[in-house]
Amino acid sequence: MTDLTLMTSVSDPASVLPALALLSHRVRVLPMDVASIVRMPESTILFVDAREDLATARTICRMVASHGFATPIILVLSEGGFTVVNALWGITDMVVASASPAEVEARLRIISERGPLHSASAASDEREEDGEGVIRSGDLMVDINGYTASLHGEPIDLAYKEFELLKYLVQHPGRVFTRAQLLQEVWGYDYYGGTRTVDVHIRRLRAKLGGEYEHIIGTVRNVGYRFDPPQEASHAEGNEGS
């Protein structure tokens, strides 16, 4: 059984690709918006409903690819939609909405047999862990066991939660997290503060990293934050704060 995710804006998900209802795979349904991207599990095949809203579908597909997710994407199209899709969409495959169960199963099998896809950003290749709990990313060093961090060999004076937040982001390079996810993972289930706590700690981290490195903690507008390895990070619009 393959884990599948269907993004759609219609009220009846079964109408998007009826063949899915006749297969034995588990299908998770999410709204077709940017915020749903971070709600996907790491190991899933994503179906994007592009039958009626090609523009939104294109945005979703390109954001999944550009943010470093290794998620295979199958675009569900009407016959006329095939004329506008190209390689820049970042998709793995396309299927017409009326495809038979046998065709859909064959496409899923081929994708599964290819194995995990390489992350589009290759962010994990920019991070090295030496086996002693020390993660190095460019000139940034995070000692997980020693609860210390340094930049250019100079220690960074971090409060406990600032360190925990930096550590969590560095451990998941290129992965976008919502404020609620970071609050849950770093502060824990029993924390009752609001998500603005995350914004405050992000600002403090950026300030302590300094002008040269503050942009390695990137902002994805309307979604959350991610760690951009120094080798790949750039001063892109939207990284200046919350």
Image (spheres, helix red, strand yellow):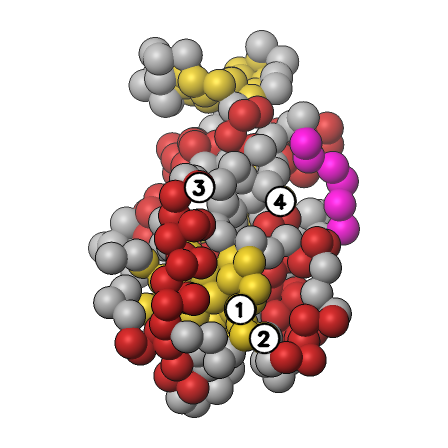
Residue under label 1, please give it.
Answer: 95
Q: What type is the residue that disc 2 sits on?
A: Leu
Q: Residues within 10 Å of mark 2 (few under 14, many from 20)?
A: many
**Mark 1 vs mark 2: which is more N-terminal?**
2
Q: Marks 2 and 3: in contact by CB < 8 Å?
A: no
Residue 7: x %, y % from top left: 47, 71
Q: From where the camera sits, is residue 184 visible?
A: yes
Q: Secondary structure at mark 3?
A: helix
Task: Label the magenta part by its dominant secondary structure.
Answer: loop
Q: Residues within 10 Å of mark 3 (few under 14, many from 20)?
A: few
How far apart are labels 4 and 2 at the CA level?
33 Å
Residue at image location 37% in from the left, 76% down from the top:
19
How far apart are labels 4 and 1 at the CA level?
34 Å
**Mark 3 vs mark 2: which is more N-terminal?**
2
Residue under label 2, please give it.
Answer: 77
Camera-side residue of 175 and 103 = 103
Q: What type is the residue that disc 3 sits on?
A: Arg
For the record, the magenta segment spans 232-237
Q: Secondary structure at mark 1?
A: strand
How far apart are labels 3 and 4 at the CA level?
31 Å
Picture quadrant where residue 221 is located: bottom right
How far apart are labels 1 and 2 at the CA level?
6 Å
- The reply to whether the magenta stretch includes residue 170 is no
Residue 142: x %, y % from top left: 46, 21
Mark linked to residue 114? 3
